Image: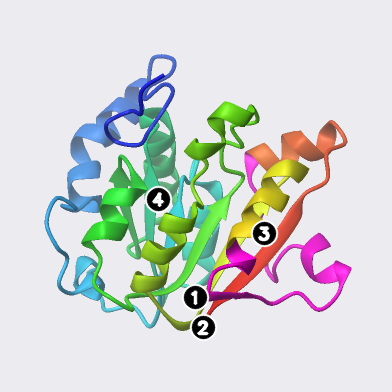
Amino acid sequence: MPEHPTGLFGRRKGKKLRERQAELLRTALPGATFDASRPILDAAALFPERPAALWLEIGFGSGEHLAAEASRHPDFGYIGCEAFLNGVAKALTLIEESQLRNVRLYEGDARAVIEALPSSALDGVYLLYPDPWPKRRQRKRRFLSDEMLGRLARVMRPGAELRFATDIDDNAGWTLTRVLRSADFTWTARNAEDWRSPWEGWSGTRYETKALLVGRRAVYLTFRRN
């Protein structure tokens, strides 16, 4: 199967949007999104007020974690990337309900945002429960490749954290292998509890809740930019 030209696979849209969701895509998304087709010279300028720190969430799903973090840290700025249109619509609903001004959304491939951001722009990155692509021939589709780690290193400041969660053991091991051989990142875990326990203030995701209900255990890996 040839590579998708954008690096994305699978559906871009699911079931029919609710009337309110469709309305928010028309009226609210233009003010909450930004252009990633050209270099972003000043990432903080994407927000009405310059944030004290800037985080990127890659593949935010329905936006529940993104909105929770933005509510908890109103002085931080959050950029959320999601290729699934229904997820963007749900995130817009949460943003409107909480009147969040510190969130910017990008509907599409996060690679475009990472390419457009200036060097050392980010204080942190979340990649939570990405598609594990379980078949051997599909593994090249996994997001945290050696090449992507290099690209993320460029846009993350020294000391910034890359936070990765998965409930798939093979995906955890595959990711660890690539991070441990990278000169740009260090795994911060000192004991098993460091990767078995979620981060402070963790709000969780819908996918995580479903995984735990069927007995799958999650791991929470923190990598620091050197």
Question: Residue 95, labelled with which disc?
Answer: 4
- The Cα–Cα distance between marks 1 and 3, rounded to whole angstroms, is 13 Å
Q: How many marks?
A: 4
Considering only order in the chain, which callout, 4 or 1, is on the residue closer to the N terminus? Answer: 4
Majority secondary structure of magenta residues = loop
Q: Are marks 1 and 2 in contact (CB under 8 Å)?
A: yes
Residue placed under numbered mark 2 in the picture: 226
Residue placed under numbered mark 3 in the picture: 176
Residue placed under numbered mark 1 in the picture: 184
Considering only order in the chain, which callout, 2 or 1, is on the residue closer to the N terminus? Answer: 1
Considering only order in the chain, which callout, 3 or 1, is on the residue closer to the N terminus? Answer: 3
Q: What amino acid does circle 1 point to?
A: Asp
Residue 35, horizontal then vertical, whole percent: 15, 52
Local SS, label 4: helix
Magenta extent: 179-206
Q: Are marks 3 and 2 in contact (CB under 8 Å)?
A: no
Q: Is residue 221 above or below residue 27?
A: below
Camera-nearest label, 2 or 4: 2
Q: What amino acid does circle 2 point to?
A: Asn
Q: Residue at x 70, y 67 (%)?
A: 199
Q: Is residue 11 left or right of residue 38?
A: right
